[in-house]
Image (cartoon, rainbow, N blue to C red):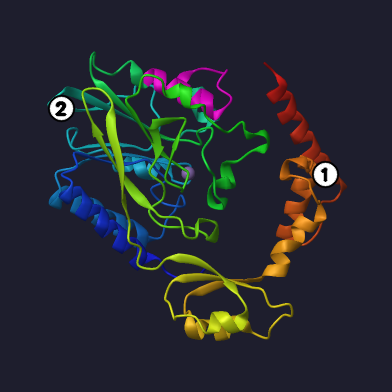
Amino acid sequence: MGLSLEDDHEAVLGQIIETLVAEAVDVLVIAGDVFDRASPPNSAIRQFNRFLKRVAEETEAAVVMISGNHDSGDRIEAMSVFSTPSRALVRGIADAVEAPLVMRDAHGEVAFSALAFSYEYAARELFGDESISTPADVIAAQIAAARAQVPAGARWVVVAHAFVAGGAVGEAERALTRVGGIETVPAEVFAGADYVSLGHLHKPQEVGAHHIRYSGAPLAFGFDEAGQEKSMTIVDLHAQGSDIRTVPFRPLRRVRSLTGSFAELLAGSPSEDFIQAILNDETPLIDPMKRLRAVYPNACHLTYARQARAPESRAPGAGRAAIPPIDMVGDFLKVMRGRVPDATELALVANRLHTTQVAEDQP
Ligand SMILES: [Mn+2]
């Protein structure tokens, strides 16, 4: 969008600090992605360092943090080297020996296992197991390594970065998505954990069970997340079971979609929010964005409702699943590049889809 989100992040990070203090939180879990790219700008690193310093100085909370698929694992791992074992467990790179952070409360010990995100090829090498071929295999190997280190009788919290089956996915997380859904990890892999704290999906949600949860991203990252309330999850672990609730964030600027005629939108209340305008005017207007920004200075996207409707008319009565994958890939490439795939590209895609299909059909 070309707009800086630094102030928006600062507001939410401040609210996290307030909540850690107000709720006397024992452990802050950051389940990745920490940053949205492997080489984040220095301003983002500085802002995050300031935040961690405030957690250390102004709160009693320990920190358990893992890298996600967008992070540089090595960059996150660097933060672990000198961290105080009782106050922080930071994991950027998966390990075959997953030592937990062990905390103690009135009911006894709680072990936190922090499973850094790992691709299959890296996990095959790490665990010396050539049969690791899916994200579910990776997590299963990490879980087995972690479980072996949990003290007898301790309750167990698992922190992981994965797409757990059944989760609602948004546009920003789709980079990991492969045809056929084999990237998903079944919730059953976490059997035995008292709580599973997940990162990757942006929408706050539970998956498969009450105690297996995504806290969600602290800010909305696209218009598909417009209107979604972001929050932090507060978990009270009991001797058995847990209480789970959310504390909503109050974003500086919201991400909103406004639908109406151009005249109606111009007459709306002025707002600094990030606005997507969906115009239902039948004829295109001249430079509407410039005039909209007089009312909504952070308006950053504009479409006409008749354009948005157009794709539906292509396959009347047919669900999205009815479109063959090869056509879906072709449509995607056409939208992204403005031309359909050529014969060589189609052959490559078809070959890859076939391999995936064969792999899925195996028992
Ligand atoms: Mn992710």
Discs 1, 2 touching: Cβ within 8 Å: no
Dot 2, how many residues are within 10 Å of its Cα: few (below 14), some (14-19), or many (20+)? Answer: few
The quadrant in which residue 263 appears is: bottom right
- The stretch drawn in magenta includes residue 149: no
Q: Work out whether residue 71 can be spotted.
A: yes
Q: Is residue 360 above or below residue 62?
A: above
In the image, residue 313 lies at what x, y percent? Answer: 79, 57
Seen in the picture, residue 28 relative to 263 is either above or below; the reply is above
Viewer-proximal residue, 316 or 333?
A: 316
At label 1, counting other C-alpha atoms closer than 10 Å, the crowd grade (few under 14, some 14-19, many 20 or more) is: some
Q: Which mark is residue 346?
A: 1
Q: Tell me the amino acid under the disc marked 1.
A: Leu
Q: Secondary structure at mark 1?
A: helix
Instruction: Looking at the picture, tell me which residue is in the foreground, 356 or 283.
Output: 283
Label 2 lies in ligand 1 vicinity (Cβ under 8 Å):
no
* Residue numbers of the magenta segment: 127-145
**Res. 305 image quadrant:** bottom right
- SS class of the residue under badge 2? strand
Q: Quadrant of residue 334?
A: bottom right
Check the image and report above or below for 47 versus 55.
Answer: below
Q: Residue beneath label 2, please? A: 104
Question: Which disc is residue 14 wearing?
Answer: none
Residue at the right extreme, as displayed: 343
Please tell me whether residue 117 is drawn above or below residue 127 in the rendered image: below
Residue in the picture at 27% in, 30% down: 242
Q: Can you tell which of label 1 and label 2 is closer to the viewer?
A: 2
Q: CA distance from mark 1 to mark 2?
A: 57 Å
Residue 73, image x, y percentages: 41, 40
Classified by dominant secondary structure, the portion drawn in magenta counts as helix
Amino acid at dot 2: Arg
Residue 126 visible in the current orientation: no
